[in-house]
Image (tube, rainbow, N blue to C red):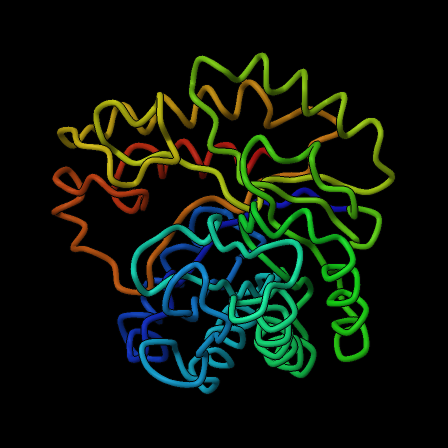
């Protein structure tokens, strides 16, 4: 597997923010960092963690036309594409907490109903991935409480393979790499590598031992750090309070690339993230989010990617 010098683009996939001049500019600027892959990421909503219906056809989710535009734009820039549809909860609870009773109980929401809706959602975008020639398809992201439902995930993957012939991955959450029991069903293993800057040595040792026991490639489907004071210690906390700090973000990237970026068993990054609507470059110093546009981390990433 080629090394993935990747970037996540377009999150959260809000209708009307793709397929326009600003989105075109955004992806073109992203490609200048030496990326060879992009994860085109969008979200659909269920009302709350115990809801069983996922709505991907209405606002705020991007339209299928917008999704196809983004894929074709990326391919036109010479990038390979991983299409990544993700479910979120409309009430703001993180998707990792979507959960139901393991045994069916009358009058309570059930796993079978949720997986039926989720399968419809994932198969819809799998067909788009097939029709547009996406090189990879991500069937889920950080669904921690669902991970134990091995039979349902295996059945979902079986159904995806009936409509999509490319590479399939699942993006598990940080620290969950060794907990998935159905990695053999996917083609590539991926996780969210939001590890504290001081924890890289321990995590690299753990992940190296994990990867050695697998018969397929492993990479980070997500990894990154906001440009915010304190974020290097909690890179997964997008709501952490702190003053903007481009130096903190850049330092995090330098350490991450040094610690894991060139390990022979590690196959790359789909960094988090690059929005469809960029802030003005002159305002980069006051932006405290994950995007690296106009920040020192962008040059650090470009230097690493062009050497990889």
| Location of residue 89 with respect to 180 vertically, above or below | below
Work out whether residue 278 or residue 83 is closer to the camera in this orientation and state it.
Answer: 83
Work out whether residue 104 or residue 172 is closer to the camera in this orientation and state it.
Answer: 104
Work out whether residue 88 or residue 249 is closer to the camera in this orientation and state it.
Answer: 88
| Location of residue 190 with respect to 43 vertically, above or below | above
Q: Residue at x 36, y 57 (%)?
A: 29
Work out whether residue 103 or residue 230 is closer to the camera in this orientation and state it.
Answer: 103
Q: Residue at x 39, y 78 (%)?
A: 62
| Image spot of residue 107 (x, y percent) | 52, 71
Q: Residue at x 45, y 62 (%)?
A: 50
Identify the image quadrant of residue 167: bottom right
| Location of residue 68 with respect to 286 vertically, above or below | below
| Image spot of residue 26 (x, y percent) | 33, 62
Q: How many marks?
A: 0
Identify the image quadrant of residue 228: top left
| Image spot of residue 230 (x, y percent) | 25, 23
Q: Is residue 101 left or right of residue 207?
A: left
Which quarter of the rendered picture does the C terminus lie within? Answer: top right
Q: Is residue 242 left or right of residue 291?
A: left
| Image spot of residue 149 (x, y percent) | 70, 53
Q: Residue at x 45, y 68 (%)?
A: 51
């Amino acid at each position: 597997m080629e090394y993935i010098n990747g970037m996540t683009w377009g999150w959260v996939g809000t209708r009307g923010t793709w397929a326009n001049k600003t989105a075109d500019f955004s992806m073109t600027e992203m490609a200048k960092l030496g990326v060879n892959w992009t994860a085109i990421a969008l979200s659909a909503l269920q009302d709350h963690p115990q809801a069983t219906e996922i709505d991907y056809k209405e606002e705020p989710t991007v339209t299928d036309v917008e999704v196809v535009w983004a894929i074709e734009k990326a391919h036109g820039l010479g990038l390979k594409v991983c299409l990544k549809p993700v479910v979120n909860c409309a009430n703001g609870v993180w998707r990792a907490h979507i959960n139901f009773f393991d045994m069916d109980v009358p009058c309570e929401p059930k796993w079978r109903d949720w997986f039926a809706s989720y399968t419809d959602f994932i198969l819809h975008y799998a067909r788009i991935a097939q029709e547009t020639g996406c090189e990879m398809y991500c069937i889920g992201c950080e669904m921690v409480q669902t991970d134990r439902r091995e039979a349902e995930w295996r059945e979902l993957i079986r159904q995806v393979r009936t409509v999509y012939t490319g590479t399939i991955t699942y993006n598990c959450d940080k620290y969950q790499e060794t907990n998935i029991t159905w990695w053999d069903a996917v083609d590539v293993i991926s996780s969210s590598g939001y590890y504290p800057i001081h924890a890289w040595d321990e995590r690299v040792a753990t992940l190296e031992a994990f990867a050695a026991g697998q018969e397929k490639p492993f990479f980070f489907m997500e990894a990154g750090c906001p440009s915010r004071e304190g974020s290097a210690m909690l890179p997964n906390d997008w709501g952490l309070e702190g003053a903007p700090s481009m130096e903190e973000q850049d330092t995090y990237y330098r350490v991450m690339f040094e610690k894991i970026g060139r390990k022979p068993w590690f196959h790359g990054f789909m960094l988090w993230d690059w929005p469809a609507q960029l802030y003005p470059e002159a305002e980069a110093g006051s932006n405290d989010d994950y995007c690296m546009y106009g920040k020192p981390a962008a040059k650090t990433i470009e230097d690493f990617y062009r050497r990889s």
